[in-house]
Image (cartoon, rainbow, N blue to C red):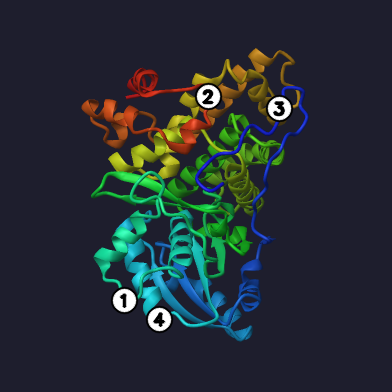
Amino acid sequence: MAGSLPPAAVAADGAPGTYDLVLPPVIRFGAGRVAELGAMVAGLGCRALVVGGRRGLFGNPVWATITAGLEAAGVGWRPLVETAGEPTVAGVAAALGAAAACRQPGDVIVAVGGGSAIDLAKAVAGLVVIAPPGADRALLDQFVVDHLEGVGRGLVLEETPLPLVAVPTTAGTGAEATRNAVIGCPQRCFKKSLRSPLLVPRGVIVDPELTRSCDRTTTAAAGLDCITQLVESFICRFAAPVPRALALAALPAAVTALPRVLADPDDLAGRAALAHAALLSGIALTNSGLGMAHGVAAALGVECGVAHGVACGMLLPVALAVNRTAVAGDLALLERACDPGATGDDAAAATAFVSRITALVEHCGLPRRLRDIGLAPDRLDWLAANSGGASMRGNPVSLGAEALGPILAGIH
């Protein structure tokens, strides 16, 4: 059910229980495959409303490839909005107004960008079909809030969204394969999800070459977000068999590829490994859940405006240390996947995995302490109290605000 996490899908004896699997019906992966976007859109409609990423999609050379492909497939196109950071309620309301004003039969929403662009596009695709006609900005603002988890009226999406095609240009969020759109509201001090299986994109093109435009900081933050999603979905208390298998397969390549790409931005094989891992991490998290790192990262984004991947990278080693004893067997499996020669002792292998991830985070050179991203000491209690939600419910060790407070104080 939308807005809730499934029961654990792996029994104590390892037998699979009952679980659902939600993923995009069409995924095309590989270098150069952005040229196939026109044909994919043509199978869904006759005009593309394009949501672009903040790195200047519409002035980027890839834009010429995209428009040529659309036109060759007989698909019209229109730029809808260029994102400027993570989606906000106000930004979604503005995009909804623009989409409603120009909408016509056969429209397909096309998102080309990072997780922010894809999440904004999901929200537009899901909400424009039910938005009140002629609504002003204030009404649309409240309309958006009323459909988010934990705020407003808790309204559920029931009508089929406009078709959505997602083309990620970062290798991290996996938003191209998830069922939710994360939307913040600085005025109301929250970051919540619009969530429904209906929001999963109808088509996905993952072209690793598109990530070449990412700078080092973006590459590092996105890579750590992807790795955090793989790890947390694997050890999540709601983890299901298929997501666990995907995480186990993707993580070793991601851990190896990230330092390579940071050292050599032209390492296309490394970029492909990260892009593939990001895709699989999106499938894994949307069908299992996450944990402490993501639970705290959302609140940090609200309070400090820190990039999500930076927050995840800071918090993952801490979350692993907190959960190490409870899920030593799982962490040992991850360590042996990264190093087939690792010890057979689960406790020792789990410790080695925590050390491996900590060293990787340090290598990326991103902020390591909460004070480094601007969190004031007197906001630690607020952070602990507001780090809940679906992600935290999946953490292997139950953590309320009282237990979380000292942990966060330790990394301030």
- The local secondary structure at tag 2 comes to helix
Image quadrant in which you'd find residue 207: bottom right
- Which residue position is annotated with label 4? 102
Q: Position of residue 272 (x, y in %)?
A: 64, 52
Where residue 384 appears, as percent x and y from the top left, is: 34, 27
Q: Mark 1 highlights which residue? A: 134
3 or 2: mark nearer the eye: 2
Q: Amino acid at mark 3?
A: Asp
Query: What label sits on residue 339 in the rendered view?
Result: 3
Q: Quadrant of residue 82?
A: bottom left
Residue 332 x/y as whole percent? 67, 22
**Disc 4 or disc 3, which is closer to the eye?**
4
In this view, 105 is above or below 174: below
Q: Tell me the mark number nearer the camera, choosing from 1 and 2.
A: 1
Q: Residues within 10 Å of mark 3 (few under 14, many from 20)?
A: some
Compare marks 1 and 4 and give the one earlier in the sequence.
Answer: 4
The reply to whether discs 2 and 4 touch (Cβ–Cβ < 8 Å) is: no
